[in-house]
Image (cartoon, helix red, strand yellow):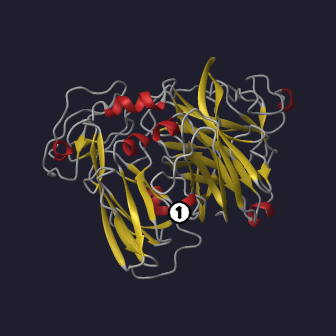
Amino acid sequence: MKSVSRRTFLSGSAAALGISALPVVVSSPVNAQTGATSLQVTTRTLDIGGRAATVKGIVDGSGKPGLVLDPGSRFRVELTNSLQEETIVHWHGQIPPNAMDGVSNTAPMIAPGASRSFNFAPRPGTHWMHSHVPAQEIDLLAAPLIVRSAEDAASDRQEVVMFLHDFSFRSGEEILADFTSGAAMDHSEVQMGSRMEETPRRIIGSHSADPMQMSGMAYGGTPMKGMAGMDHDGMAMDLNDYEFDAYLANDRTLDDPEVVRVDKGGRVLLRIINASSMTAFWIDLGAVQGRLVAVDGDPVEPLLGSRFGLAMAQRLDIELDMPTTGAAVPVLALREGARERTGLVLAPTGATVGRIATLNDSAHPAFSNDVAQELALRALHPLASKRADRTHMVMLGGSMSPYVWTLNGQLWGSHTPIAVLQGERVEMIFHNMSMMAHPMHLHGHVFQVVNVNGTRIEGAIRDTVHVPAMGMVSVAFDAGEVAPWMLHCHHMAHMATGMMTELEVRTT
């Protein structure tokens, strides 16, 4: 077992920062790799509030999490599974040959002790790698995957990675069992909107909203105490359906946050990755204004702000200038609809860093149905203008009780693939008929957001789009390699209970 404490995760000392208010250490991003690289799927030990926790992870030969590639490098990786169970790793945000995508519908699982080679030209940007087994992703089997561009190398700015997780002392299998124990019933009952009285332990919310139900039907349940949900025709939106034990930034809580040494008045590029299995966040810069310059690894026209929303599997690149006063800048991730928060601190030499509570005084607002950010984003390099050759409506449905989530009214394993032809411009309309938002991820492609709740835009290029409850989002893309490509919700409990299908790219 690979043991990595929170102290060995970082380097340096508090003395180097001149900090006395909080015991901290200095950190820098994962070192860039050159040539062929060995990655290992393994276990590691974290210190969470003074309690040891064994989690999974992906580390390089030196034990550091993830991978950073220099400009122009190929993705040449030898991946070894050191777990006692089979696994498979998806390179999220990359477009490798289908056989290297890291999903079990097109490639065999990697057996314990076995290795697999990967070699392809990577897409630059802020991406990540993670198990495509939902329980393993809940167990933190994920890591950053940063592909630096020539522009990154030429820029006079420090790059800092912030990798977010929701964490439980219980295993991913136990957590998913909580959900699925309330979902083991005939799907025809789900379509009719029937309920089960028993709610799995620690699951919150109880709304039912399947696309087969009539819009005039009544919905039961109440939002959790303090939840900042939205009201849609008398129905409260569910935001958080599981209570985790902690929320982590680079494997740490705010009880002992990472403090990153930066230059006074210097420029920083924050590469923020939401690797959480079920949690959306606001990224809060406090009094500092940042420039959102990329989402999901693709550049956007700079968007100014001090708070940006981030759904599961999405990434934000935020450029900011440190205060010339030499003050520290906390970068906080605020759990939507709740009081919990996590984060790290950017601190020049001599800066004072005070303690930051893990709980805010009041619940943070909802992000999942706030579409203002998505409407404001504009791709710096949009798709070529072209009329859609084919349009598909994809219905998102499901319920909290029974806990089953569907695409086009179907579950994974009994799904009908969505057929397109190679080279076609496809417009896909995600129509959400449930009371939860869904971060929809398409493998093997990037897409442009072109419509949000009826407003036509030339939006961001993404690989994961957050579809609001009872809302609609349209994306456009050009169909790629002839193969079946996964399409699924990136909320792990939704995916595990059936919210997954395939985009089937054909020649005829």
Does any portion of residue 205 appear in the rendered image? yes
Query: Which sits in the foreground, 208 or 459?
Result: 208
Image-based side of 450 in relation to 63, left or right: left
Q: Is residue 496 above or below residue 253?
A: below
Furthest-top residue in this view: 50
- Name the residue tied to disc 1: 98
Image-based side of 470 in relation to 23, left or right: left
Q: Is residue 101 above or below residue 161?
A: below
Locate the N terminus and report the quarter of the image it occupies.
Answer: top right
Locate residue 18, reporting x and y percent: 84, 29
Q: How many marks?
A: 1
Amino acid, disc 1: Asn
Locate residue 347, reporting x and y percent: 76, 37
Locate residue 418, reporting x and y percent: 34, 65
Task: Kindly identify the residue that appears in the image at 73 percent across and 34 percent down.
Answer: 259
Locate the C terminus and report the quarter of the image it occupies.
Answer: bottom left
Q: Is residue 459 above or below residue 238?
A: below
Task: Kindly identify the residue that appears in the image at 58 percent across and 58 percent down.
Answer: 100
- SS category of the residue bearing label 1: helix
Furthest-right residue in this view: 16
Locate residue 383, reporting x and y percent: 52, 75
Query: Which sits in the foreground, 394 or 84?
Result: 84
Query: Which sits in the foreground, 346 or 411?
Result: 411
Furthest-bottom residue in this view: 386
Does any portion of residue 370 appear in the rendered image? no
Q: Quadrant of residue 399?
A: top left
For disc 1, the neighbor class at 10 Å (few under 14, some 14 to 19, many from 20) is some
